[in-house]
Image: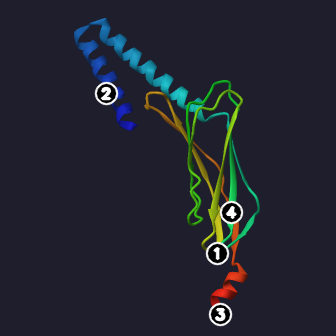
Amino acid sequence: MSYRRNAIYLLIILSLLAGLFSGRAIFFSVAYFLGGLLIVSYIWAWTAVRWIRITRRTRSRRAQVGGTLEEEFIVRNCAFLPKLWLEIRDHSDLPGHQASHVTPAIGIRQSYHWHVKTVCIARGEFQLGPVTLMSGDLGGVARAIQLSKATMRTIYQNLFWAFIYNI
């Protein structure tokens, strides 16, 4: 993505230099157009992650080894413009937990949700989150990121399986 942005910067500089040396108005027009395109791309990317609410719900704060941890994610678009795509990256350290997702288009004042079930294979206290929300503009020039907070969940030893294992 930064290659496209750097290419636009380079084209702006080259067209400004060509306009200064040649005196032709077309080069200045190209530079102004590309500069405006860059500004619109950054505004589009910034508004793509604003007014988005992510809710993460778990059925319980505890689980046992061998049991499942169930989560529900709800992404709400509180803006007056639809969101074409949103990439949600989960940075949990729970082993085997895969909650990252790319949402399809979310309309005005609509929401999108999905469920994640993870089999708990290790005991201990694990961090669920933080979640990174990423989006960009249509041309892939600008990218915006929004971060959320992490929560902690405890995975306890299942005493029945521990008893069977030790026999």
In whole angstroms, how far apart are the C-alphas of marks 3 and 2?
Answer: 70 Å
> Which one is earlier in the sequence, the residue at label 4 or at label 3?
4
Examine the rendered structure and indicate whether residue 120 appears above or below residue 166. Answer: above
Query: Is the residue under label 3 in contact with that under label 4 (CB below 8 Å)?
Result: no
Question: What is the three-letter code of the residue carrying label 3?
Answer: Ile
* Residue that label 4 marks: 69
Q: Nearer the viewer, residue 28 or 98?
A: 98
Secondary structure of the residue carrying numbered label 1: loop
Which residue does the numbered mark 3 point to in the structure image?
167
Say whether marks 3 and 2 touch (CB < 8 Å): no
> How far is the residue under mark 2 from the one under mark 1?
53 Å
Q: Residues within 10 Å of mark 4 (few under 14, many from 20)?
A: many
Query: Measured from the top left, where is residue 151 in percent x and y?
Result: 69, 59
Quick check: 142 above or below 23? below
Give the numbered dot on residue 123. 1
> Where does label 2 land, which residue?
10
Q: CA distance from mark 4 to mark 3?
A: 27 Å
The kind of residue tagged 2 is Leu
Q: Amino acid at mark 4?
A: Leu
Residue 70 is situated, as x and y percent measured from the top left of the image, at 69, 58
